[in-house]
Image (cartoon, rainbow, N blue to C red):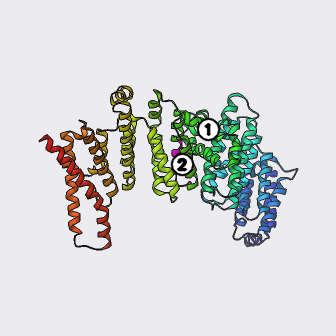
Amino acid sequence: MSAEIDGHDSSSDQHPLLRLQEILTSISKAFECGNISQSDNSVAELVKFLDSVSDPIESDSKNASEILAEIHEFLCTPSLDQAIIDSLSFELPKAVTKFAGLSSSCSEIANSIIDKLVATCSPRDMLSILCEALDSSIKTIKECDYFVPLLSGLLKVLLSTQRRHFEQAKVAVPVILKVLKTVSLEEDDENRECQHLFDQAIGIADAIRQVCLKLEGRMNEKLRALLGLYVLQIMVLVSVSMDHKSPRCIPLVSQLSGFLPYCHLSYLGLISGNDVDTMTSLVVGDNEDDFMSCLSNVEQGASLSVIWGSMSDQVVQAAGEDLTALKGELQSNQTKKWQAIAMLKHIFPSRKLSWEFKKHAIDFLLHITDGNNYQKSDSDHSDFASNMPSVFAALQGVIMVIMYAQSSTLRKNAFDALKRVIAEVPYSEKFDVLKALMTNCDSSSMIAVLLDIVRQEVLKERNKRKSIGNEEVQQGENEACPNTFFWPAVVLELVDLVLKPSTGGPPPLPEYGDAVLSALNLYRFVLLMELKEENNSEVLSKSNLKKAYNEWLLPLRTLLTGIAAENKDDYDRLAVDTECTLNPIVLVLYRCIELVEDKLKQFA
């Protein structure tokens, strides 16, 4: 018994290379004897040994290279039983890739070992083995180096597959994308090894393209669609994880864009979302929500593909596109324009994308809303209605740019873009859009901006009615779209949102000062306009005037009077700032009260 213990102790003190040779010999003998139990134990011992010597802190890269070289030499032995290789193929990929981060030599030999397994084992088995190795490792390992040999092996497996190419690729793609997403977003943007990971991912895309060339008909179409979705998802990961100014970024994006023509993807089809819908319908079957989860950002990738084209001539050339023609088409085709605006919702609100993407997206939006080069038709209303939720989300994203962008130029351009898009919204929908934007905004300053847009729309409508005649307008546009015009009821409702909050009582001041001042100014504006033109509109009706007086103006006056009394003898900075904020509100408020009281006297 003691002799056995001593023997074990002496083996543990052996040079690692000698210990490895001993284990490999044990594996060969076990298979020769047909001892299944012993062969399983020996393979498990090999895995345990490799785990013990692959620790990057304790391992010596030279010894590690020798160990990997010994395993590779063992696998290349001409007389080696295929059963041994098959048995080792289940364990070695995961075990040897742990050495990849120790040195470039270790990474190369690990690649060679996996290549040998791929070349000698069933491609179908190796696909499952490599996918399992990737999927299980991503839970605990985040280093790029570890995954490069596995992805390289997967590339070769896809090329060597003889049948069911689409199904095999569909198994691999979710795992690959999971690894890319987890690791690329974990790594530093400037980490060189992360580029190697994307290089392998693009290599896999090229392998899928090569397999497509072997197929015809429906299978070719489906695999090409899967390739397109795969490329768009990687486009997002590159855009999010790498600095757009990095010299390594543009070449990667150009390579990805080079796949677009092969996949029959155009900038027009991508920015309208139609190409994504077509590909998804080809690839994703019923009850495949789990699969689609790995492609959750393909619409963002479609938008980014076009925006990258506007950022780099190299990218747009790789895609074989003409941006000038694209913008012209979107300017003249209102349906496509609404679809394009809707797709930009994937860029503006994203916190992971740099401001540079949002800047170019705003510029793109300004280009496609420049001028009025389309002919209005009866379908304009239905076109907008079908895209309204997504257009609304895009407008909310533009508002975020206005509020948070550091560049004053970008904020100004975003505001211009917001006004242009709202101007193109059909009159019958415009109120709903503006009301929803105000309701879903918690910024007093932004609500003030939106109310000023309302004022401009009211003024625009007034001028239009004066120029072509109120009766003609009502008989023309208003027949198709009831409640076409912004006022008077619409203005009253928007002002009511601010001056009579749903929480009850007058609006909080001074923090809500910008919105309150803008609402009062808007109300004063329409009052003066209606009084000047002597219109018998809802704004000047007795019931609405009493409502404004009792529910908006008097409660607000009471609140302001109370605040002024509290700060009367207080001269600290906060009190002075509060007074400066509230003074303009007081002036406009009392003017509104004066106008309303004068009009109510006429009813008396």
In this rendering, does residue 269 appear at all? no
Amino acid under disc 1: Leu
Q: Which residue is mark 2?
A: 362
Circle 2 crowding by C-alpha within 10 Å: few under 14, some 14–19, many from 20:
many
Left-right relation of 339 to 570: right
Per the model, the C-alpha gap separating discs 1 and 2 is: 16 Å
Q: Quadrant of residue 187?
A: bottom right
State the quadrant of the C terminus. top left
Q: Is residue 351 magenta?
A: yes
Which stretch appears magenta? 342-353
Residue sitting at x 34%, y 56%: 514
Query: Percent position (x, y) of residue 106?
Result: 77, 61
In this rendering, does residue 461 appear at all? yes
Left-right relation of 327 to 511: right
Query: Percent position (x, y) of residue 584?
Result: 30, 59
Q: Which mark is residue 129?
A: none
Residue sitting at x 20%, y 66%: 565
Circle 1 crowding by C-alpha within 10 Å: few under 14, some 14–19, many from 20:
some
Secondary structure beneath disc 2?
helix
Residue sitting at x 51%, y 60%: 406
Residue 213's place in the image compared with 41, above or below, is above
State the quadrant of the N terminus. bottom right
Q: Earlier in the sequence, mark 1 or mark 2?
A: 1
Q: Which residue is mark 1?
A: 326
In terms of depth relative to the viewer, which is nearer, 52 or 566? 566
Residue 411's place in the image compared with 257, above or below, is below
Query: Percent position (x, y) of residue 73?
Result: 85, 57
Q: Is residue 554 magenta?
A: no
- Among all residues in the image, which is located at the extreme left? 604
Query: Percent position (x, y) of residue 417?
Result: 49, 46
In terms of depth relative to the viewer, which is nearer, 35 or 332? 332
Amino acid under disc 2: Ile
